[in-house]
Amino acid sequence: MGSPKHTTDLDRDYTIPQDWERYTDAEHEMWRRLYRRQAEMLPGRAAEAFMDGLTKLDLNEGGIPDFRRLNEKLHGLTGWTVEAVPDLVPDAAFFRMLAGRRFPAGRFIRKPEEMDYLEEPDVFHDVFGHVPMLTHPAFADFMAAYGEGGLRSLEFGALDHLARLYWYTVEFGLMKTPADGHDGLRIYGAGILSSKGESVFALDDASPNRIAFDAERVMRTDYRIDDYQQTYFVIDGFEALLDECYQDFAPLYGRLETAAELTPAAVEDADTILHRGTQEYFAEKAA
Ligand code: HBI
Ligand code: FE
């Protein structure tokens, strides 16, 4: 009995060895530069859960972390492990990894000339940006539930809606806290946390909208991948996010079939608006 000719994405494992010993001093220095830059500016901007995660995982400016050491700590905290992958993995495989509490992380690190922007997620975006949040139990549960939801969304042809949920929370999410500064807003989205410019823009610039998170609203809202976000969605906490997303999305997917899609800068009457953006930064760029 020969092996099946075509394994589906779900069967294939896209992980590769990290080969931590092969990183060069220049690559470790790149991590140090990126780490120092963000570590200097994030206190008071990043969610407490993120800062706690850096400490619990002993992530520091020492250089690119060895996933074997990192996983000893991470797995003990929330059952997650970080696995090196060569680049973006197909959506179905991505969801399956998350559902199995395995976070796919780029193994490569950006070049100096890509310091401020790069297309593909590198080890700094993935491990500095995403992994500390996986030490928070409710967020760790949310990410695994998201993976399960992603696999189900494929059956409904609702991948795009679910990708938006990921984008506006895991990548670019803000949360409201009672803390002082920045109106109590704090960052938990990896795309912001790993970016110097957006760590300021997302909290302090008048241009973007800041709207209370609502799963259905988020799934109707398109996003841009080439610049800062025109709208940030704000959660009240990770337990609230988990509760909102534990619901069965099937009825929601039905409503989304006929609901109007929204552009990234759209504001609706039903929105709870924390800040109505001027969109100035984007108008100037478009001019
Ligand atoms: N693959 N390695 C990797 N990292 C991601 O963040 C990632 C991915 N594949 C698909 C994906 N993200 C997004 O399209 C998800 O929203 C589905
Ligand atoms: Fe990411």
Image: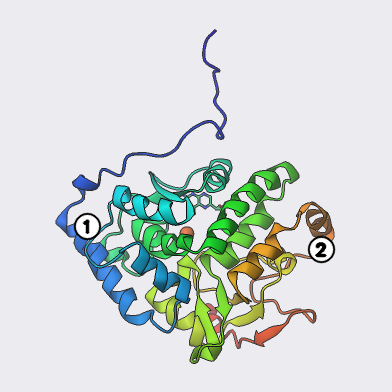
Residue 144 % position (x, y): 57, 52
Residue at point 24% right, 67% down? Answer: 61
Residue at point 51% right, 48% down? Answer: 101
Q: Is residue 122 left or right of residue 282?
A: left
- Asked whether 17 or 136 is in front, the reply is 136
Amino acid type at image mark 2: Ala
Residue 181 % position (x, y): 48, 91
Residue 279 % position (x, y): 59, 84
Q: How is the image coloured?
A: rainbow
Q: Is residue 209 left or right of residue 284?
A: right
Give the number of callouts. 2
* Quadrant housing residue 185: bottom right
Q: Are marks 2 and 1 in contact (CB under 8 Å)?
A: no
SS at circle 2: loop
Residue 124 % position (x, y): 35, 61
Residue 99: assigned label: none
Q: Is residue 145 above or below residue 14?
A: below
Q: Is residue 182 above or below residue 130?
A: below
Q: Is residue 87 left or right of residue 1?
A: left
Which residue has dot 2 on it?
259
In the rendered image, which quarter contains the N terminus?
top right
Which residue has dot 1 on it?
27
Point out the frontmost of discs 2 and 1.
1
Q: Residues within 10 Å of mark 1 (few under 14, many from 20)?
A: some
Q: Earlier in the sequence, mark 2 or mark 1?
A: 1
Most distant residue in the top direction: 1
Amino acid type at image mark 1: Glu
Residue 273 can be seen in this image: yes
Between marks 2 and 1, how big is the CA–CA gap?
47 Å
SS at circle 1: helix
- Asked whether 38 or 111 is in front, the reply is 38
